[in-house]
Image (cartoon, rainbow, N blue to C red):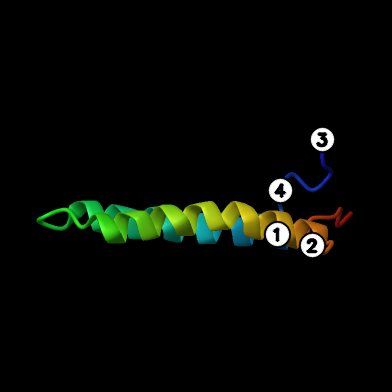
Amino acid sequence: MSDNHGNTPAAWTAVVVGLLGFVVGAIGLMLDPINYTIFWVGVAITLASGVLFVIMAKMGLHGSTH
């Protein structure tokens, strides 16, 4: 396990971008009629948060801060 318990810039950035993706996707589902384009953009943003996390972790932004 990590010493930082996920309290790193990489983790926080991934969480914020993932949350943004969920919000965008939810907006697409709430529209009448449902806008699948906006929904899939939200899905892509959410998936990009995982890629962003891996990139930031490899840059050293997920290391121990203790």
Q: Residue flagged by tag 3: what amino acid is it? A: Met
Q: Which mark is residue 6?
A: 4
* Residue 40: % across, % down: 35, 54
Q: Nearer the viewer, residue 15 or 44?
A: 44
Identify the residue shown where x is 52% and y is 52%. 47
CA separation, marks 1 and 2? 5 Å
Task: Kindly report which numbered mark, 2 or 4, lies closer to the viewer in this rendering.
Answer: 2
Q: Which type of secondary structure does the marked residue at label 3 adopt?
A: loop
* Residue 63: % across, % down: 85, 55
Return the disc, 3 or 1, that comes first in the chain's sequence.
3
Q: Which residue is mark 1?
A: 10
Q: Residue flagged by tag 1: what amino acid is it? A: Ala
Q: Which residue is mark 2?
A: 61
Q: Residue flagged by tag 4: what amino acid is it? A: Gly
CA separation, marks 4 and 1? 8 Å
Q: Residue flagged by tag 2: what amino acid is it? A: Leu
Q: Which residue is mark 3?
A: 1
The answer to whether residue 27 is left or right of residue 62 is: left
Return the disc, 2 or 4, that comes first in the chain's sequence.
4
Eyeballing the image, is 55 above or below 50? below
Return the disc, 3 or 2, that comes first in the chain's sequence.
3
